[in-house]
Amino acid sequence: MSSSPENPTELVGVVSRESLYRGDRRGYALAITKRAIIGAKKPDSPDFEAYLGPGSSPTDSLRRDAETLAASLIKSKDFRVPVGAVGQVLFRAPSLFEGGYFIIKTPFDVFRVDTSVLYVDADLVRTSKILAESFAAVLGWRLCDGRTGEPLAAAR
């Protein structure tokens, strides 16, 4: 296989949900690889999420589906941020009455992906956990609590 940054063997996590949004664009998706974070509009397909990083044991079918989705996100990307360029990702989990977010900060740009509130989509608890685990796997201490700014990896 090639050693491109988006090589499917480097895929750590992928999420595509109608309850994620960026700006006023509802229905958003993120693919996290060992080398890059890719954001794109959610494709016209059912919601999907998978964590494939350390400690996971996905089925071959789940891995194939995740790789197929990630490949489509890479082709239609809104943004691609190399992992080495990420200074910090601020994370706040959604609650019953307050949405959550992931804010990806680089030296030159900021990318924000928000989540709906839990009463709209209770599955966002699992989605947020998958995204947080994926970010932690590739960023370590650079994944931080959105309220305090403290690294979340230390709390693992």
Image (spheres, helix red, strand yellow):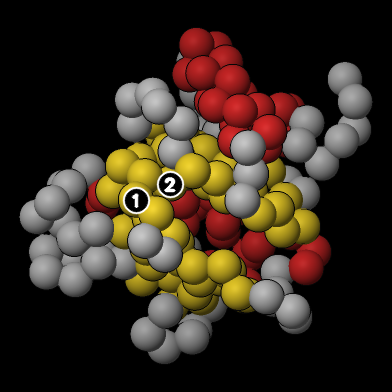
Residue drawn at (33%, 25%) of the image: 46
User: Which residue is painted at 65% across and 62% down in the image?
Assistant: 139
Which label was assigned to residue 80? none
Which mark is on residue 26?
1
Asked if residue 35 is positioned above or below residue 56 in the image, the reply reads below
- Quarter of image, res 85: bottom right
- For disc 2, the marked residue is 28
Which amino acid type is shown beneath numbered disc 1?
Arg
Please state which amino acid type lies under the numbered disc 2. Tyr
The kind of secondary structure element at disc 2 is strand
The answer to whether residue 77 is left or right of residue 13 is right
- Residue shown at 28%/48% (left/top)? 19
Distance CA(mark 1)–CA(mark 2): 6 Å
Observer-nearest of 83 and 80 = 80
Q: Is residue 66 left or right of residue 146?
A: right
Which residue is at 17% across, 47% downward? 121
Q: Quadrant of the N terminus?
A: top right
Q: Position of residue 3 (x, y in %)?
A: 90, 33
